[in-house]
Amino acid sequence: MRIKTVSDSATVLSEVMMPLHANHYGSVHGGTILKLVDEAAYVAATRHARKNVVVASMDYIEFKHPVGVGDVLTLRASVYHVGRSSMDVEVEIETERIKQGKVLKVGSAYLTMVALNEKGKPMEVPRLILKTKEEREKNLQIKLKRQRRIAHFCGCE
């Protein structure tokens, strides 16, 4: 099985937010942003595994800045940790108030994606090699988040 790097899965999605994405106040629906987070994570995980992938979980997300109609929403996703069949993906979310030239960090999300075979069963994914200090730090942060999430679900907290 091949070994992959974080850069092999790197994905950037950008989309102009239109009135159909927003509520009556002109703020983009959180659900619209979550859908795009899911899409970015899907692309990153598929680039890593080159298999069908599905979301197993998404960690807590906080929206630090509103996203408005006319803003360019950009999502940057990469795989920072892999298990046997799972991949932990970080998605960073930012909004560009394009007329003002102002970029704001909206938040970030962590998703666990699982690779599936043709029968819908989990299958092994390539190992991940971490090349930079930043990649190693993000890998460690994601492992800690994963341990907390597993402890929460099993009631082992």
Image: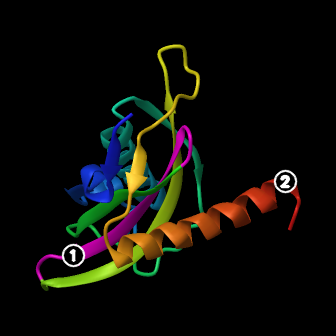
Q: Quadrant of residue 29?
A: bottom left
Q: Nearer the viewer, residue 119 or 55?
A: 119
Q: Nearer the viewer, residue 139 or 116?
A: 139
Judge whether residue 87 is colored magenta. yes
Residue 131, image x, y percentages = 31, 66
Residue on which the image places disc 2: 154
Residue 55, image x, y percentages = 53, 42
Tell me which residue sits at (74%, 56%) in the image: 150
Nearer mark to the viewer, of 1 and 2 = 2
Q: Quadrant of residue 6?
A: bottom left
State the extent of the magenta-drawn residues as a range: 83-99
Judge whether residue 76 is colored magenta. no
Left or right: residue 52 versus residue 152 is left
| Whole-number angstrom distance, CA of label 1 to CA of label 2 | 40 Å
Left or right: residue 111 versus residue 71 is right
Tell me which residue sits at (35%, 68%) in the image: 93
Residue 98, image x, y percentages = 14, 76
**N-terminal-most mark, 1 or 2:** 1
Tell me which residue sits at (34%, 79%) in the image: 105
Mark 1 lies on a secondary structure that is strand
Identify the amino acid type marked 2.
Answer: Cys
Left or right: residue 12 versus residue 154 is left
Q: Nearer the viewer, residue 47 or 94?
A: 47
Identify the amino acid type marked 1.
Answer: Glu
Residue on which the image places disc 1: 96
Look at the picture and state if 78 lies above or below 46.
below
Is residue 12 at all visible to an observer of this figure?
yes
Q: How is the image coloured?
A: rainbow
